[in-house]
Amino acid sequence: MPRHEQHAGPFHRMNDTLQTYHGSCHCGRVTFDLNAKPISAVMDCNCSICRRRGALWHGASDGHLRITSGEEHLQLYQFGTMTAKHYFCRHCGIQPFVRPRLDPTRWAVNVRCIDGVDLSALNVRTFDGENWEAAAQAFVQGVRRAAGSHPDQSESSRLAP
């Protein structure tokens, strides 16, 4: 969100189910909005990059994440299979979001970059990125099971490492 705009708090109610969360990199050049149900769970991945970065991830579809300023300050980093697209601010080095290897059509947002989220209140789920293939298979099966028992589950509530 451009710095000159004022908000009543770290997020505002869009409707009964979605909230708009505001976030940024450390230097504030890259800002974004995430439309999501109240964030109660995040994914902690232990792959080689995530464990070093310390990010906590929350999944989002294209329609639920909007870069509000600083897209030109984003740098892309890829490694390994070159599937995931890790975006970070080229000035401060913070990674606010990624196109994850598990589903590169979606976003995973680093919840540590979102204003006003109480990290101590979140349910932290582990994704075993060190054993990526087996973890990905288990994750996808879990999402399918959850979708079968909760067909109204929104795209923004699905986690994506």
Image (cartoon, helix red, strand yellow):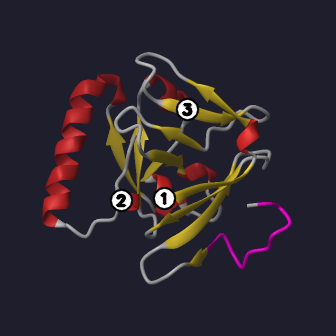
Q: Amino acid at mark 3?
A: His
Q: Position of residue 61 (x, y in %)?
A: 43, 53
Give the spatial CA distance, label 1 vs label 2.
Answer: 9 Å
Q: Which residues are magenta?
A: 2-11
Q: Which mark is residue 86?
A: 3
Q: Residue at x 42, y 26 (%)?
A: 83
Where is mark 2, residue-wise? 155
What secondary structure is marked by label 2? helix
View extreme (bottom): residue = 16
- Work out how far the residue at label 2 is from the one at label 3, CA to CA, in angstroms: 20 Å
* Residues marked 1 and 2 touching at CB (< 8 Å): yes
Measured in 3D between alpha carbons, the distance from the residue under mark 3 to the one under mark 1, in whole angstroms, is 19 Å
Residue type at mark 2: give it: Glu
Drawn side of residue 51 relative to residue 157, left or right: right
Q: Which element carries disc 1, helix, strand or loop? A: helix
Q: Position of residue 109 (x, y in %)?
A: 52, 48
Q: Position of residue 108 (x, y in %)?
A: 47, 45
Q: Quadrant of the C terminus?
A: top left
Report which residue position mark 1 lands on: 63
